[in-house]
């Protein structure tokens, strides 16, 4: 017995006949253009001997419809903020992306040259195709002569009109939908549309289901997925179920998948019928259900390339082989094709490549009518955009006010804490981010893995309407609903929201889960921020990965949750300047650290905050440095009162509190006097001028120091440089096993990191230095 879907807000239609007048006057031109595109795709693979020709070919007519008809955009300004965007969630189709963008540029260069930007960095030219899957240091002469772009193997924002780094399995769908929610929030009811290119294999990762569910739940009607359903992945020619044939991987078809998640579905049985493709895309634009839309096109991977199905996924014809020649014969006479021998040098290959591209250029210049017609369609896309007159909605957030308000030297009076207050680190972080969110009019969009209140990220949205964000029904909410327990999809969505440039995204969960599950999204976001500056200069666009309930103090949940390891995944593990980790011990440190992190403008901010409430200590009475010192990342928490017997570097709230409350009295009784440093952020310390770093923590200190950390031993290697210091460094795994369950204090005790354990370790360290009095 089968059961129908329950009530949907969305619609499911099948396009079997083209609408009247769709592409009639351009059909011949578009057909020829596609032949040139498919041939150019074959050329890119031939001379790189790398890439993914199959999906690039099968998606060609789909993408052609998007760039010549469905999108409203300005070819002269790839950074124009109000235009529609195309995002390749299927990053492996980058070969096709580059072929399509370069061919479009060439058509406009011939047909309407005045429409192109003057700055070559804002174009993807034929000359740039010489850089496909080439390194920026490529020494070949034409690459240098033409100042060709190095086109990454999977898309990055170094390419004009590309806003995200994609390609890692499933990340592109979440980050593309992050673009959509940011555009919807900033522009309101006439938000820029985000056209997402994907294949059915890209739907199989779990993080994609999380993101797709979010878009359906949140009413992201400006999100349109164009799904190239070719049924071929690396290992299978039957990825999904189709009719009565079971799938090798999943037992749904893409229409069912999207309709389940309350997306509109437009089914196109023949994804190579240009009129049907364009009809479906126009109907997608006209949908008014308030739901996102998936247009599903049935295609064949490697169509007319000479290799079809899974074999064309990441492989193609050998260099200048007869099979390669055959793939181009519908366009060129084989006798006219430039060729090179299999053993050609890189310089010979490049010269042959360029000669082939010149053949394409000559062919297009001879087809001036085609170029003028299609260039006119591109220009019309810009005119449509101008006629829309999109402006930010009333009350749209201003993300720049976050950076104006983020002053680490002055704690806002509403965030000030007094000695004796009982405040959790997570609560102090939520309050700090909430202050910045209110100051910016709601520029921080938040989400949690079903832990909004538990992680206190809910406080970030306290000044805004409650409930989850919905584009029509609750657009003022700042709280995203990303699939429930969803660290993976959530991280992708908030990174994409930040990439749009009008928001900061913030995601929270247990550090044990969100640090590893958010790592891929964080890495791609950092890559994207670096690459974007090739086309759109400016600072990084941060997103916040809140590693809540961090470390041993979450002991009741046991070793599966109270995990010391996540910091090692993130700290000093990114290109310098792209990420900042925060490891405060005192709730008073959260404002200066948070403000300093935003002032640094990294791509990623990753605070590690604990769950229990902490007593705010009287730092002055205890002879401790003020909380503001944390903004430098590493600071002298407490100086030796007399002759220094050693140097201890501490990182982690649980070990810092144990040291100050329990260990210090024992050290005083034993007459052991120490300089004690605290690591609040390794990356903020790295931002200090070299002379300041040397003054705060000279190399001699690292050669003397031992460490006490609530994280893993390698996180101390930066600060503890000697074999003696490392041998005496105290850490949660020093007894050779994962810790058990129980209240935090008992887990700290089991680890030997309570006062008595720290005292014994410090005394052994001082004895090893020969400084026992």
Image (cartoon, grey):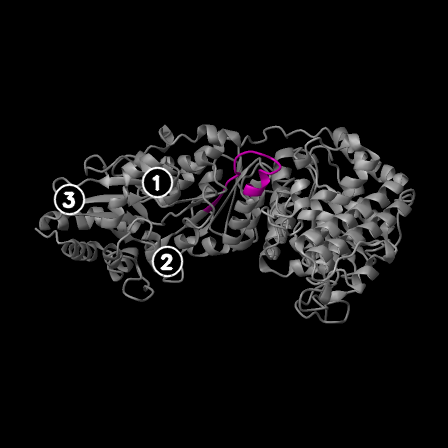
Task: Report x, y in % for residue 93.
Answer: 69, 54
Quadrant in the picture for residue 118 = top right
178 w.r.t. 486: above or below: above
Quadrant in the picture for residue 627 = top left
Asked whether, in this view, residue 356 is left or right of residue 644, the answer is right
The answer to the question of whether label 1 and label 3 lie on touching residues, with beta carbons closer than 8 A, is no
Q: Is residue 535 magenta?
A: yes
Q: Is residue 233 magenta?
A: no
Point out the frontmost of discs 1 and 2: 1
Foreground of the two, 20 or 583:
583
Query: Gap in Å between the C-alphas at discs 1 and 3?
Result: 23 Å
Task: Report x, y in % for residue 601.
Answer: 47, 36
Task: Please tell me which of labels 1 and 3 falls first in the chain.
Answer: 1
Residue bearing the label numbered 1: 633
Point out the frontmost of discs 1 and 3: 3
Which residue ends up furthest to the left in the rendered image?
773
Task: Please tell me which of labels 3 and 2 falls first in the chain.
Answer: 2
Q: Secondary structure at mark 2?
A: loop
Magenta stretch: give its range.
529-545
Foreground of the two, 573 or 82:
573
- Is disc 1 surrounded by few (<14), some (14 to 19) or many (20+) residues within 10 Å? many
Query: Gap in Å between the C-alphas at discs 3 and 2?
Result: 35 Å
Q: Secondary structure at mark 3?
A: loop
The answer to the question of whether label 3 and label 2 lie on touching residues, with beta carbons closer than 8 A, is no
Asked whether, in this view, residue 115 is left or right of residue 201, the answer is right
74 w.r.t. 208: above or below: above
Asked whether, in this view, residue 504 is left or right of residue 77, the answer is left
252 w.r.t. 105: above or below: below
Query: Gap in Å between the C-alphas at discs 1 and 2?
Result: 24 Å
Quadrant in the picture for residue 6 = bottom right
Residue bearing the label numbered 3: 644
Residue bearing the label numbered 2: 562
């Amino acid at each position: 017995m089968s059961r129908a879907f329950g009530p949907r807000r969305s619609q499911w239609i099948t396009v079997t006949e083209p609408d009247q007048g769709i592409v009639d006057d351009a059909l011949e031109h578009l057909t020829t253009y596609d032949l040139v595109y498919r041939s150019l795709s074959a050329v890119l693979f031939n001379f790189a001997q790398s890439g993914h020709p199959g999906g690039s070919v099968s998606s060609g007519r789909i993408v052609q419809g998007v760039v010549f008809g469905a999108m409203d955009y300005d070819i002269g300004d790839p950074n124009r903020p109000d235009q529609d965007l195309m995002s390749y969630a299927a990053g492996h189709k980058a070969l096709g992306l580059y072929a399509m963008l370069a061919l479009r540029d060439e058509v406009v260069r011939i047909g309407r040259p005045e429409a192109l930007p003057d700055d070559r960095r804002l174009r993807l030219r034929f000359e740039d195709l010489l850089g496909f899957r080439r390194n920026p240091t490529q020494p070949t002469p034409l690459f240098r002569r033409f100042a060709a772009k190095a086109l990454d193997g999977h898309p990055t924002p170094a390419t004009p009109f590309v806003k995200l780094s994609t390609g890692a399995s499933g990340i592109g769908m979440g980050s593309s939908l992050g673009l959509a929610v940011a555009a919807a929030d900033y522009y309101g009811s006439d938000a820029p549309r985000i056209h997402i290119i994907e294949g059915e294999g890209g739907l199989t990762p779990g993080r994609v289901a999380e993101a797709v569910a979010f878009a359906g739940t949140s009413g992201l009607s400006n999100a349109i997925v164009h799904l190239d359903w070719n049924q071929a992945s690396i290992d299978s020619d039957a990825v999904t179920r189709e009719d009565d044939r079971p799938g090798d991987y999943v037992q749904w078809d893409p229409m069912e998948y999207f309709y389940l998640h309350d997306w509109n579905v437009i089914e196109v049985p023949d994804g190579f019928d240009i009129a049907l493709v364009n009809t479906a895309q126009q109907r997608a634009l006209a949908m008014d259900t308030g739901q996102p839309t998936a247009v599903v096109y049935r295609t064949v991977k490697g169509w007319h390339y000479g290799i079809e199905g899974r074999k064309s996924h990441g492989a193609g014809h050998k260099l200048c082989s007869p099979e390669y020649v055959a793939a181009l014969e519908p366009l060129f006479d084989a006798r006219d094709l430039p060729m090179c021998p299999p053993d050609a040098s890189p310089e010979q290959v490049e010269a042959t490549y360029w000669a082939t591209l010149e053949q394409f250029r000559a062919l297009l210049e001879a087809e001036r009518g085609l170029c003028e017609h299609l260039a006119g369609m591109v220009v019309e896309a810009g005119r449509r955009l101008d006629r829309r007159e999109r402006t930010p909605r009333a009350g749209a957030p201003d993300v720049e006010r976050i950076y104006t308000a983020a002053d680490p030297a002055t704690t806002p009076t509403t965030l000030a804490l007094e000695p004796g207050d009982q405040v959790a680190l997570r609560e102090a972080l939520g309050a700090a981010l909430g202050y910045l969110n209110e100051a910016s009019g709601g520029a921080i969009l938040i989400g949690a893995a079903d832990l909004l209140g538990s992680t206190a990220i809910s406080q970030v949205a306290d000044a805004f309407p409650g409930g989850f964000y919905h584009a029509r029904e609750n657009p003022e909410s700042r709280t995203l609903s990303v699939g429930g327990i969803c660290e993976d999809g959530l991280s992708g969505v908030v990174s994409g929201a930040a990439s749009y440039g009008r928001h900061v995204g913030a995601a929270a969960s247990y550090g044990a889960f969100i640090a590893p599950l958010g790592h891929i999204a964080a890495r791609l976001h950092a890559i994207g921020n670096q690459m974007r500056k090739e086309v759109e200069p400016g600072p990084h666009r941060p997103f916040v990965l809140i590693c809540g309930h961090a470390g041993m103090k979450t002991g009741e949940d046991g070793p599966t949750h109270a995990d010391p390891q996540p910091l090692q995944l993130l700290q000093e593990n990114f290109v310098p300047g792209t990420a900042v980790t925060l490891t405060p011990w005192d709730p008073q440190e959260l404002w200066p650290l948070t403000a300093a992190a935003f002032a640094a403008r990294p791509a990623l901010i990753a605070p590690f905050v604990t769950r229990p409430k902490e007593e705010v200590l009287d730092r002055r009475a205890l002879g401790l440095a003020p909380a503001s010192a944390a903004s430098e990342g590493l600071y002298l928490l407490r100086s030796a009162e007399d002759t220094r017997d050693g140097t201890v570097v501490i990182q982690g709230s649980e070990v810092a509190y144990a040291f100050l409350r329990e260990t210090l009295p024992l050290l005083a009784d034993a007459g052991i006097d120490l300089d004690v440093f605290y690591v609040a952020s390794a990356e903020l310390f790295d931002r200090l001028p070299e002379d300041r770093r040397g003054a705060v923590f000279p190399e001699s200190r690292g050669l003397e120091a031992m460490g006490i950390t609530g994280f893993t031993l390698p996180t101390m290697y930066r600060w503890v440089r000697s074999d003696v210091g490392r041998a005496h460094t105290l850490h949660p795994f020093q007894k050779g096993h994962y810790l058990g369950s129980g209240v935090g204090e008992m887990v700290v005790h089991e680890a030997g990191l309570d006062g008595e354990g720290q005292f014994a370790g410090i005394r052994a360290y001082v004895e090893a230095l020969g400084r026992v009095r």
